[in-house]
Image: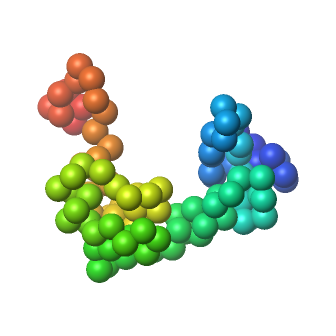
Amino acid sequence: MNLCERCSQPATLWVAVGGVERWACNACADSLTAIRGLGALAEGMRRPARRDGKCPNCGVTEEDARKNGLVGCPLCYAAFRDSFWSDIAIPRGRWTRSELW
């Protein structure tokens, strides 16, 4: 288990910046100024999933993300997590869906 770089509590957020891994707990994520945008990402992950099918950060709709197979930003994963997270989390490679479930 990785620990927060500031308070040594269990880390819940991880970001790689310039090849360097940075770890933070939810409490410290907002104050890490070395990682631009980490506070907004942490806040977005703590918010409940939206019910209108639209990312609050970039405006991508759930329908567009499904159709294109791409999300618009990291906060899309939190915004759409209740509806299609399992669809986009399928590992790629030699395994088929039947082998995984």
In the displayed structure image, the side of residue 87 where residue 20 appears, left or right: right
Where residue 77 appears, x then y in whole percent?
40, 58
Q: Position of residue 93 (x, y in %)?
A: 27, 23
Q: Residue furthest bottom?
A: 52
Q: Residue at the far top: name it.
A: 94
Task: Tell me the residue at 26%/58% (across/down).
Answer: 65
Q: Residue at x 77, y 53 (%)?
A: 34
Q: Nearer the viewer, residue 27 or 39?
A: 39
- Residue in front for this viewpoint, 69 or 12: 69
Decide if residue 26 is in sight here: no
- Residue 81 screen position, x and y as percent: 36, 61
Task: Please tell me in which quadrant of the rendered image residue 49 appears.
Answer: bottom left
Q: Quadrant of the C terminus?
A: top left
Q: Is residue 30 above or below residue 7?
A: below
Badge count:
0
| Residue at image coords 28%, 73% | 53
Q: Answer with left or right where residue 20 lies relative to residue 75.
A: right
- Relative height, residue 81 to residue 95 (above, below): below
Identify the residue at horizontal 24%, vertical 31% (top origin).
100
Say how the picture is coloured. rainbow
Q: Is residue 26 above or below residue 48?
A: above
Q: Residue 76, can we see it?
A: yes
Determine which quarter of the picture holds residue 72: bottom left
On the picture, is 20 further left or further right than 97?
right
| Figure quadrant of the N terminus | top right
x, y percent for residue 21: 69, 37
Q: In the figure, 17 relative to 33: above or below?
A: above
